[in-house]
Image (cartoon, rainbow, N blue to C red):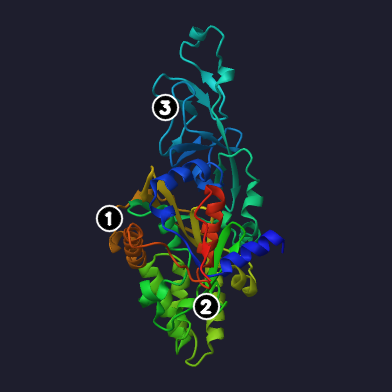
């Protein structure tokens, strides 16, 4: 471990206070727009959204907008979403085009960013030509089926930026997963409050007491360079499949209960196949079967049933499952709850310059039989009801809004993350302060 890494490790292991400026200050939000968002690698979309030549997605962050597009040559490129003539945005949302034409004055570009036409361009009398006004490029790279972008030409390569994330999570084969459902809303809290609501497991007993029917499960938390991770302190199970049943007197019934509960209350972090197999555990295994054997039977039967329909599980050693935990935070604004054939993902972005609002997105990924992958729309679901968002997310939403209200109180001076279970949050603010230039965690011991 390097001296710098050792110093950083000690910082996230200590009890600290983190001030509230980062959550409520308009000036801090402007500093993020200037010093954070243009410099980091961030997820813009999934590769499946730009699968064919001409497919494009626009990604808006703070006051910037980026177009991600698949070229005729099959390469994925990204460009600043603006016309070189009068700065009008060229595209909104997503779709498929042969090129981009500005709706204002009809200047046009091909999918590689080369200018095709300047309406009555001879007016410039040679002082400005098509070769002078290509679309302004943005760096793009892929990992795990996601398309990342950065506006910083001097940023390190994506693989270096991801560091341990890339190597530790590679066995999960995210690139082979596809959207199962996706939706978003504009939420009344800072984007960091939204991300932090899912970046630790310390809150489960208080926020989701129904998920602790059999036991209250402590968690561990750590940093992977810029990023954060946490998991069950028991460091056992496979992708969270058994965590909800830990402590059950009868593991057969415990797994059946916990997996059906996740399917109903989260609609994620498991699959229909796994739920169906769990429902058969009481009939397939005798009462008194040791918990470890029940868990192994669940995994074995689920893998077999998935294989019958063309879904192949990756080979991941149980020790590796324990090492990588259950939840990953990719700095700055994505959280992934990962499993062997599924993932539940969160992304939060600032809503303009208002520090009290954010765009909050949730989606699930899953492995599907080839040719049976769904293509769900990204649904705008502003009503925070269980019909739209299920019980567990609505419980999290209640915290997010109330926390933002509390952070604005004149009586509140800062937060005190757990030195054991919220190290990922401490690391988040340490890294954030490196970019923004202020707001670093302050030791309190």
- Residue 432 coordinates in the image, percent (x, y): 53, 53
Of residue 333 and residue 113, the one placed in the foreground of this image is 333
Mark 2: few/some/many CA within 10 Å (<14, 14-19, 20+): many
Residue behind mark 2: 298
Residue 168 is tagged as: none
* Sequence-first tag of 1 and 3: 3
Residue 182 visible in the current orientation: no
Residue 292 visible in the current orientation: yes
Image quarter in which the N terminus is found: bottom right
Mark 1: few/some/many CA within 10 Å (<14, 14-19, 20+): few
Please state which of the two labelled residues, at mark 3 or mark 2, is closer to the viewer.
3
Classify 185 as above or below 412: above
Q: Are marks 1 and 3 in contact (CB under 8 Å)?
A: no
Please state which of the two labelled residues, at mark 1 or mark 3, is closer to the viewer.
3
Residue behind mark 1: 383
Q: Secondary structure under badge 3?
A: loop
Residue 88 is tagged as: 3
* Sequence-first tag of 3 and 2: 3
Marks 3 and 2 sit apart, C-alpha to C-alpha, by 55 Å
Which residue sits at x=50%, y=29%? 98
Marks 2 and 1 sit apart, C-alpha to C-alpha, by 36 Å
* Sequence-first tag of 2 and 1: 2
Label tally: 3
- Residue 240 coordinates in the image, percent (x, y): 51, 72
Classify 135 as above or below 423: above
Q: Secondary structure under badge 1?
A: loop
Marks 1 and 3 sit apart, C-alpha to C-alpha, by 32 Å
Q: Are marks 3 and 2 in contact (CB under 8 Å)?
A: no
Residue furthest bottom in the image? 288
């Amino acid at each position: 471990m390097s001296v710098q890494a050792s110093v950083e490790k000690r910082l996230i292991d200590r009890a600290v206070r983190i001030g509230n400026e980062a959550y409520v200050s308009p000036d801090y939000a402007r500093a993020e727009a200037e010093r954070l968002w243009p410099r980091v690698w961030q997820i813009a979309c999934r590769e499946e959204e730009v699968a064919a030549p001409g497919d494009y997605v626009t990604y808006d962050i703070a006051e910037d907008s980026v177009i991600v597009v698949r070229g005729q040559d099959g390469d994925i490129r990204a460009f600043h979403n603006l016309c070189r003539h009068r700065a009008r945005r060229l595209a909104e949302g997503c779709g498929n085009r042969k090129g981009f034409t500005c709706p204002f004055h009809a200047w046009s570009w091909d999918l590689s960013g080369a200018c095709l036409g300047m309406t009555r361009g001879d007016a410039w009398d040679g002082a400005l030509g098509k070769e002078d006004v290509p679309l302004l490029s943005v760096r793009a790279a892929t990992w795990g089926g996601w398309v990342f972008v950065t506006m910083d030409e001097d940023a390190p390569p994506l693989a270096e930026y991801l560091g341990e994330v890339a190597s530790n999570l590679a066995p999960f084969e995210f690139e082979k997963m596809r959207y199962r459902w996706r939706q978003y809303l504009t939420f009344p809290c800072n984007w960091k409050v939204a991300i932090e609501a899912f970046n630790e497991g310390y809150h489960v007993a208080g926020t989701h007491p129904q998920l602790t029917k059999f036991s209250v499960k402590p968690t561990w938390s750590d940093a992977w360079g810029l990023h954060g991770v946490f998991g069950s302190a028991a460091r056992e199970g496979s992708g969270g499949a058994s965590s909800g049943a830990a402590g059950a007197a009868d593991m057969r019934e415990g797994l059946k209960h916990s997996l059906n509960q996740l399917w109903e209350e989260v609609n994620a972090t498991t699959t229909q196949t796994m739920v169906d197999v769990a429902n058969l555990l009481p009939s397939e295994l005798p009462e008194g079967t040791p918990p470890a054997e029940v868990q192994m039977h669940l995994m074995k039967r689920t893998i077999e049933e998935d294989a019958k329909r063309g879904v192949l599980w990756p080979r991941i050693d149980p020790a590796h499952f324990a090492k990588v935990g259950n939840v990953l935070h990719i700095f700055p604004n994505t959280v992934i709850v990962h499993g062997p054939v599924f993932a539940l993902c969160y992304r939060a972005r600032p809503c303009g310059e208002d520090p009290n609002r954010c765009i909050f997105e949730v989606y699930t990924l899953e492995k599907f039989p080839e040719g049976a992958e769904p293509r769900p729309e990204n649904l705008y679901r502003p009503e925070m009801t269980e019909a739209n968002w299920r019980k567990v997310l609505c419980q999290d939403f209640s915290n997010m809004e109330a926390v933002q209200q509390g952070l604005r109180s004149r009586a509140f001076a800062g937060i005190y993350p757990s030195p054991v279970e919220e190290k990922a949050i401490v690391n988040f603010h340490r890294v954030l302060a490196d970019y923004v230039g202020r707001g670093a965690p302050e030791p309190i011991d």
